[in-house]
Image: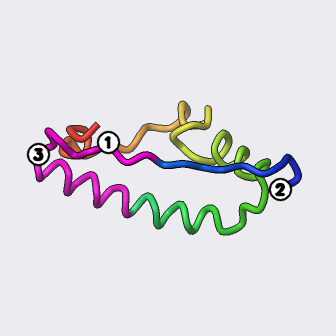
């Protein structure tokens, strides 16, 4: 990358205390999110493009999300946060 190399690290946390129904709902939501990210990120080739995606396009972080009604999150999934 033009700005230098980088390394990402993901730390897994235990599912202790999560109800099985909430855990299953969370896994399903994360699987859908991962598929969506694969499609959306296929054209991202630089950190600049990734930054633009995260802060301009992705509805969790862009300010334009404040202009539209948010899709409700399944209560089972909410229980997993």
- Helix, strand or loop at mark 3: loop
Location of residue 56 in the rendering, given as x and y in whole percent from the top left corner: 68, 42
For the residue carrying disc 3, how many other residues have a C-alpha within 10 Å: few (<14), some (14-19), or many (20+)? Answer: few
Q: Which residue is mark 2?
A: 1
Nearer to us of marks 2 and 1 is: 2
- Residue visible at 44% across and 37% down in the picture: 69
Location of residue 1 in the rendering, given as x and y in whole percent from the top left corner: 83, 56
- Residue visible at 71% across and 44% down in the picture: 51
- Residue visible at 50% across and 63% down in the picture: 36
Nearer to me, 68 or 45? 45
Choose the circle earlier in sequence order: 2 or 1. 2
Choose the circle earlier in sequence order: 3 or 1. 3
- Helix, strand or loop at mark 1: loop
Location of residue 43 in the rendering, given as x and y in whole percent from the top left corner: 71, 66
Which of the 4 image quadrants contains residue 40?
bottom right
Q: CA distance from mark 2 to mark 1?
A: 37 Å
Magenta stretch encompasses residue 55: no
- Residue visible at 18% across and 45% down in the picture: 76
- Helix, strand or loop at mark 2: loop
Q: Quadrant of the C terminus?
A: top left
Q: Which residue is mark 3?
A: 19
Q: Which mark is residue 72?
A: 1
Nearer to us of marks 2 and 3 is: 2
Nearer to me, 12 or 27? 12
- Range of residues picked out in magenta: 11-31
Magenta stretch encompasses residue 27: yes
Is there a contact, CB below 8 Å, between mark 3 and mark 1? no
């Amino acid at each position: 990358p033009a700005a230098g190399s980088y390394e990402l690290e993901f730390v897994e946390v235990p599912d202790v205390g999560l109800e099985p129904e909430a855990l299953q709902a969370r896994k399903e939501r994360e699987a859908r999110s991962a598929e969506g990210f694969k499609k959306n990120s296929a054209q991202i080739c630089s950190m600049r493009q990734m930054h633009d995606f995260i802060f301009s396009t992705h509805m969790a972080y862009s300010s334009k999300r404040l202009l539209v009604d948010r899709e409700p999150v399944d209560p089972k999934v909410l229980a997993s946060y």
